[in-house]
């Protein structure tokens, strides 16, 4: 796996146009600043405050080193009736996001979608299935094209297989 990159604003690769590099830097900075705020707003509004035309979820993983829970707001793509796919773009960085590494260490996680909290198991889509799924993603999220070009790595698609609903209060 790729080394963890520490800077959120590291310059994107030069295989992108100047415009795409600038957009990518703005997206990375925006993602960094809105990460915590997005999680709080999602929970406060029961998932009703989301980016337009996007399915989003909160993914909670257990830190592979710390053992603490970490929650991130991610765009998701439906996969059948009960499953969803998330994309480990890391905003086009050359390394996988921390949540992906956490899922590789422990594939069980928790997902919040609107008023539901689900137990899930993560599995990487096999190469052939991922190749077939990418066009669906790019139709809904064209900016992921820029992430793929900037990353210079294979970006994993992760299926979150629903294991069951968690009853009770939200975290």
Image (cartoon, grey):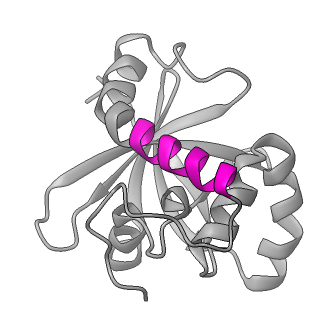
Q: Is residue 125 left or right of residue 46?
A: right
- The answer to which of 16 and 2 lies nearer the viewer is 16
Residue drawn where x is 44% and y is 64% of the image: 11
Residue drawn where x is 56% and y is 72% of the image: 13
Q: Position of residue 114 (x, y in %)?
A: 53, 23
Farthest bottom residue in view: 1
Q: Is residue 118 above or below residue 126?
A: above
Farthest front residue in view: 18
Residue 85 visible in the snapshot: no
Quadrant assignment, res 169 = top left
Q: Position of residue 91 (x, y in %)?
A: 52, 56
76 magenta-colored: no
Q: Is residue 109 left or right of residue 151?
A: left
Residue drawn where x is 78% and y is 47% of the image: 142
- The answer to which of 7 and 81 lies nearer the viewer is 7
Q: Is residue 42 above or below residue 135?
A: above
Q: Position of residue 9 (x, y in %)?
A: 36, 55
Magenta stretch secondary structure, dominant: helix
Residue drawn where x is 43% and y is 36% of the image: 30
Quadrant assignment, res 16 = bottom right
Magenta range is 18-31
Farthest left residue in view: 66
Q: Is residue 105 above or below residue 158?
A: below
Residue 81 visible in the snapshot: yes
Q: Which quadrant is home to the C terminus?
A: top left
- The answer to which of 51 and 78 lies nearer the viewer is 51
Q: How many marks?
A: 0
Q: Position of residue 155 (x, y in %)?
A: 62, 73
Q: Which quadrant is home to the N terminus?
A: bottom left
25 magenta-colored: yes
């Amino acid at each position: 796996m790729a080394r963890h990159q520490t800077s959120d604003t590291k310059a994107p690769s030069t295989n992108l146009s100047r415009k795409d590099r600038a957009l990518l830097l703005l997206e990375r900075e925006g993602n960094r600043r809105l990460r915590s705020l997005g999680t709080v707003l999602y929970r406060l509004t029961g998932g009703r405050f989301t980016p337009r035309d996007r399915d989003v979820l909160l993914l909670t993983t257990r830190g592979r080193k710390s053992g603490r829970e970490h929650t991130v707001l991610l765009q998701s793509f439906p996969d059948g009736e009960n499953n969803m796919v998330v994309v480990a773009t890391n905003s086009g960085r050359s390394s996988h996001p921390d949540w992906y590494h956490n899922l590789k260490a422990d594939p069980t996680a928790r997902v919040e979608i609107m008023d539901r909290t689900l137990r899930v198991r993560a599995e990487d889509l096999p190469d052939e299935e991922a190749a077939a799924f990418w066009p669906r993603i790019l139709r809904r999220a064209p900016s992921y094209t820029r992430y793929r070009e900037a990353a210079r790595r294979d970006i994993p698609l992760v299926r979150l297989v629903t294991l069951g609903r968690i009853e009770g209060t939200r975290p």
